[in-house]
Image (cartoon, grey):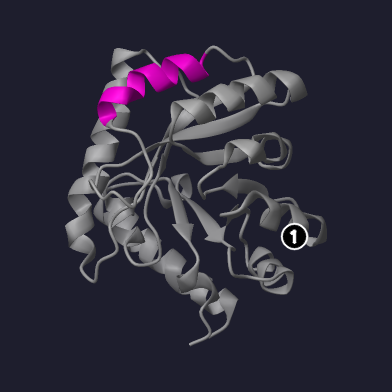
């Protein structure tokens, strides 16, 4: 199947899942994860309607961006090292993986220097897996408050990664919990319209993520697979 055909199938499934949850599928953004993908394939996806791309490593994206066609929103979805914060803020539009206070400190410092507004998501570890990055829900209010001290960093929502599993239903409680935390913190801290993104769901479980409220889906394999 072609990339365009893969995307058509994914969009059909998103529409079905959105309908099951009484959601508008137009409110859900599909991020093409391009970690292992070259420029030609990314451009094929853009021609097929992709408007958001996600890279895991700062430099990998910077090398590809100049050769991309059209205007796409650039997401950094992988772990961000503190020594890569400045180029990340310069080249990416939304950073999904704010996962530690040291990183927040560096983001605040570099954002003040370059004076470019960038949206950020706070990564929560709700699976309890030691191999997963992210903070605990108890740490969240402090992270939001600290990020909000900058006029250039915009706390825009939450991100999480579910465990890899052959049964997507096992991830549902994690996605549901993220949505509930997202809603609770919005109420308790009186967060405004900038607080709007739930980044969860990948190739193996995105339909469950849609049913549980995700509006940023990070999908790579299901888009770019050849079979």
Give percent across and percent down for residue 42. Answer: 67, 67
Q: Residue at 38% across / 17% down in the picture?
A: 142
For residue 77: magenta? Answer: no
Q: Residues within 10 Å of mark 1 (few under 14, many from 20)?
A: some
Q: Is residue 95 left or right of residue 168?
A: right
Q: Is residue 19 left or right of residue 87?
A: left
Residue 152 falls in image quadrant: top right
For residue 143: magenta? Answer: yes
Q: Residue at 33% across / 52% down in the picture?
A: 131
Q: Which residue is mark 1?
A: 64
Q: Which residues are magenta?
A: 137-148
Q: Residue at 29% across / 49% down in the picture?
A: 130
Give percent across and percent down for residue 17. Answer: 31, 58
Give percent across and percent down for residue 154. Answer: 55, 24
42 vs 138, nearest the viewer = 138
> Is any atom of residue 118 visible in this view?
yes
Residue 149, relative to residue 205: is it above or below? above
- Main SS of the magenta part reads helix
Label 1: state its secondary structure.
helix
Residue 53, relative to residue 166: is it above or below? above
Residue 197 falls in image quadrant: top left
Give percent across and percent down for residue 50. Answer: 61, 60
Q: Residue at 56% across / 54% down in the picture?
A: 56
> Is any atom of residue 155 visible in this view?
no
């Amino acid at each position: 199947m072609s990339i365009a055909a893969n995307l058509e199938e994914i969009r059909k499934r998103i529409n079905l899942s959105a309908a099951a949850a009484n959601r508008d599928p137009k409110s859900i953004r599909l991020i093409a994860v391009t970690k292992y993908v070259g420029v030609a394939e990314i451009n094929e996806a853009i021609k097929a309607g992709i408007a958001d791309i996600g890279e895991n490593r700062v430099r990998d994206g910077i090398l590809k961006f100049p050769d991309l066609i059209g205007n796409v929103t650039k997401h950094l979805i992988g772990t961000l090292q503190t020594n890569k914060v400045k180029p990340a803020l310069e080249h990416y539009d939304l950073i999904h993986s704010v996962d530690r206070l040291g990183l927040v400190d560096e983001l605040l410092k570099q954002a003040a220097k370059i004076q470019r507004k960038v949206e950020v998501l706070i990564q929560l570890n709700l699976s309890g897996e030691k191999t997963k990055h992210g903070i605990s829900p108890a740490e969240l209010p402090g992270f939001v408050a600290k990020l909000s001290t900058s006029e250039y960093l915009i706390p825009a929502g939450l991100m999480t990664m579910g465990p890899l599993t052959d049964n997507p239903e096992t991830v549902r409680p994690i996605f549901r919990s993220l949505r509930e935390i997202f809603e609770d913190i919005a109420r308790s801290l009186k967060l405004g319209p900038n607080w709007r993104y739930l980044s969860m769901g990948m190739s193996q479980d995105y339909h469950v993520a849609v049913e549980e409220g995700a509006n940023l889906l990070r999908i790579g394999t299901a888009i770019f697979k050849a079979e």
